[in-house]
Image (tube, rainbow, N blue to C red):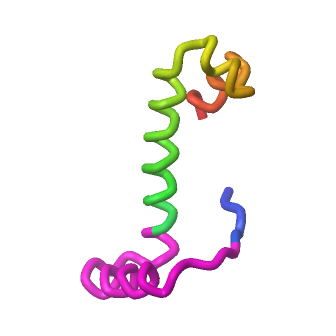
Amino acid sequence: MRKRCRFMIDNNIAIRLETNRARTGLSMAEQIRRAIQLWLETENDIVDAVPKQQAADNGRSESRARKIASS
């Protein structure tokens, strides 16, 4: 299931996404979904690498860090 989201992007990013759409056939929405997914996977790798005490100091509980990583 997907949730509809609306947000603003900079014009230069929109132009680059449109140029890429013309070249690849991927819609702007799909490009954005893929970019967000990649970014979240990278962030989860960072959360996994943070020592437990540092994660707790940042307001993240160990179980929350595991939950985020398993998503």
The answer to whether residue 61 is left or right of residue 53 is right
With respect to residue 2, does 12 lie above or below? below
How many numbered circles does the render carry? 0
Q: Nearer the viewer, residue 20 or 27?
A: 20
Magenta part of the chain: 6-31
The answer to whether residue 16 is left or right of residue 55 is left
Q: Nearer the viewer, residue 70 or 43?
A: 43
**Residue 46: x and y, percent?**
47, 31
- Among all residues in the image, which is located at the extreme left? 23
Residue at 50%, 39% (x, y): give it. 43
Quadrant for the N terminus in the image = bottom right
Residue at 70%, 69% (x, y): give it. 5
Give the quarter of the image for residue 22: bottom left
Residue at 60%, 35% (x, y): give it. 71
Q: Label the magenta part by its dominant secondary structure.
A: helix
With respect to residue 43, does 51 lie above or below? above
**Residue 48: x and y, percent?**
50, 23
The answer to whether residue 3 is left or right of residue 55 is right
**Residue 3: x and y, percent?**
71, 62
Task: Report if residue 53 lies within the magenta region.
Answer: no
Give the quarter of the image for residue 68: top right
**Residue 65: x and y, percent?**
64, 25
Residue at 63%, 12% (x, y): give it. 53
Task: Report if residue 18 lies within the magenta region.
Answer: yes
